[in-house]
């Protein structure tokens, strides 16, 4: 089981099911359950951060996409595609952001049918504040692991991610 004497709730659960489900590879179950549990906790922290700043996850992602865009602009269509949303759903999201003064719409000078969306200074600053607040919460990783362990964990997780990406590419 775990190499340290300190157990987490996953260790205790694996001990409970070991005899009942002998066909399971408990190492794999431990890895998957820990990744899932960590993911849920990070997602919960992000939801709290966004709630504290008055943003939905979708609005935050749109502000981030715009903040990283060259010139702070993208078309509404580009934003919808990146978010895997319909044009109507993206329009609703952009309406809320525009009403809050976080984005501005501009006619696209190259395509009369398109609209360029630009993040405002207030939108960029709000996005940056949420990133800073979330990064401070995610510092738990730095507290739990040494720099070398963080590098090792990144390398191991990258291997797992690449395996998933290869599988998905095969279709």
Image: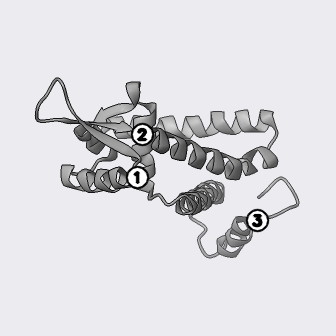
Look at the image and name its color scheme.
one colour
Determine whether, in the image, residue 92 is placed left or right of residue 114: right
Quadrant housing residue 156? top right
- Label 3 or label 1, whichever lies nearer to me, is 1
Residue at (31% x, 54% y) in the render: 93
- Spatial CA span between label 3 and label 2: 45 Å
- Spatial CA span between label 2 and label 1: 14 Å
- In percent of width and height, residue 50 lies at 53, 58
* Dot 3 crowding, Cα within 10 Å, few <14, some 14–19, many 20+: few
Along the viewing direction, whichever of 85 and 133 lies nearer the viewer: 133
SS at mark 3 in the image? loop
Quadrant housing residue 15? bottom right
- Name the residue that disc number 3 marks: 8
Residue at (43% x, 47% y) in the render: 61
Chain-order first, disc 3 or disc 2: 3
Along the viewing direction, whichever of 17 and 150 lies nearer the viewer: 150
**Which mark, by number, is residue 59?**
1
Determine whether, in the image, residue 3 is placed left or right of residue 69: right
Chain-order first, disc 2 or disc 1: 1
**Which mark, by number, is residue 47?**
none
Q: Quadrant of the C terminus?
A: top left
Q: Is residue 138 visible?
A: yes
Most extreme residue toward the right, as rendered? 5
Determine whether, in the image, residue 130 is placed left or right of residue 67: right
- Name the residue that disc number 2 marks: 120
- In percent of width and height, residue 130 lies at 57, 49
- In percent of width and height, residue 39 lies at 57, 56
Contact, CB < 8 Å: mark 3 with mark 1? Answer: no
What is the total number of numbered labels drawn onto the structure image? Answer: 3
SS at mark 2 in the image? loop
- Spatial CA span between label 3 and label 1: 35 Å
Residue at (41% x, 34% y) in the render: 166
């Amino acid at each position: 089981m775990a190499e340290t004497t300190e157990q987490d709730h996953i260790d205790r659960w694996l001990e409970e099911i070991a005899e009942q489900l002998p066909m399971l590879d408990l190492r794999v179950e431990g890895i998957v359950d820990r990744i899932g549990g960590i993911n849920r906790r990070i997602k919960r922290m992000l939801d709290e951060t966004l709630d504290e700043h008055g943003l939905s996850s979708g609005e935050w992602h749109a502000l981030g996409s715009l903040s990283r865009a060259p010139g702070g602009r993208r078309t509404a269509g580009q934003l919808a595609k990146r978010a895997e949303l319909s044009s109507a759903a993206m329009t609703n999201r952009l309406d809320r952001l525009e009403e809050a003064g976080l984005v501005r719409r501009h006619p696209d000078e190259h395509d009369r049918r398109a609209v360029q969306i630009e993040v405002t200074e207030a939108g960029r600053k709000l996005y940056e504040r949420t990133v800073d607040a979330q990064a401070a919460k995610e510092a738990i990783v730095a507290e739990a692991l040494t720099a070398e362990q963080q590098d090792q964990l990144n390398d191991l997780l990258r291997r797992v991610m690449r395996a998933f990406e290869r599988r998905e590419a095969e279709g």
